[in-house]
Amino acid sequence: MNFLKKFGRLVNGEPIQYITNSQEFMNLNFYVDKRVLIPQPDTEILVENVISLVNNMQRNCQNEIKILDLCTGSGVIGVCLKKNLQNVKVFASDISEEALEVARKNSSLNNADIIFIKSDLFNRINEKFDIIVSNPPYIETSVIDGLSQEVKNEPKLALDGGKDGLDFYKKIINEAPNFLNKIGYLAVEIGYNQKGSVENLFKTYKYKNIQIKKDLSNIDRVIIGKYEL
């Protein structure tokens, strides 16, 4: 009966990761359920570039690097950064307490010491960081109904980026400098068609050394900007 129930969930379009409560990401195993988005391989590009950024920073400075994973969801970004870097202090925040419950579980499963904060973007953030990293909701509201049934079974809160898909980028890119140290970096994942719009936001808010990173399909996937006070 348990098998038939699971098969029925699969037939009804529920992602298999929610049925097995498992997803692999950067060679680590994570728990997932309907409270969080399913981590995708494209996001590994974001994590890998932040790891590279931290390693470069640590060549010039041996101080502890403070990182904020904003809109953490399942916690995979924060966990992977903590597991792959030395001398870093990782914070992770989300507006959803349900998502944070999953993220805490993944932190424990992977033995990653992370400080979790329930916050609507920067609303309850009281620290300053060397790096802020985020994979925020970025799908246009009007597009969501046309997505596959599997994707529509994921939490809409974590998908919906507003009318133009840029609501979260506008807030994050504008407000991040208030939470960065004297020299700090913001790194974000973007949708396949958002490079121009998000890059312009970085330029509007005076970020420097803007870098665009492509995913394995040669699609612009990550933008990193440096901010100096």
Image: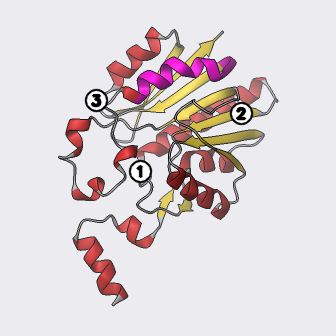
**Helix, strand or loop status at disc 3:** loop
Disc ID at residue 54: none
Q: Which residue is mark 3?
A: 193
**Helix, strand or loop status at disc 2:** strand
Q: Does residue 15 appear left or right of residue 35 in this picture?
A: left
Whole-percent x, y for residue 8 in the image: 26, 77
- Say few, some or many: other residues with alpha carbon within 10 Å of mark 3 (under 14 / 14 to 19 / 20 or more): few
Whole-percent x, y for residue 66 in the image: 71, 33
Q: Does residue 188 appear left or right of residue 167 in this picture?
A: right
Note whether residue 74 is visible.
no
Q: Mark 3 or mark 2: which comes first in sequence?
A: 2
Q: Cα distance, mark 3 to mark 2? A: 31 Å
Quadrant of the rendered image containing residue 195: top left
Q: Specify the amino acid type for callout 3.
A: Asn
Note whether residue 35 is visible.
yes
Which residues make up the magenta segment?
168-183
Q: Does residue 123 appear left or right of residue 162 in this picture?
A: right
For the point 68% across and 16% down, the residue is 183
Q: Specify the amino acid type for callout 2.
A: Lys
Kindly check if marks 3 and 2 are in contact, taking CB atoms under 8 A apart as contact.
no
Q: Which of these two is toward me, 52 or 77?
A: 77
Does 31 appear above or below 210?
below
- Residue reaching furthest to the bottom: 1
Quadrant of the rendered image containing residue 226: top right
Does 118 appear above or below 58?
below
Q: Which residue is mark 1?
A: 40
**Helix, strand or loop status at disc 1:** loop
Disc ID at residue 66: 2
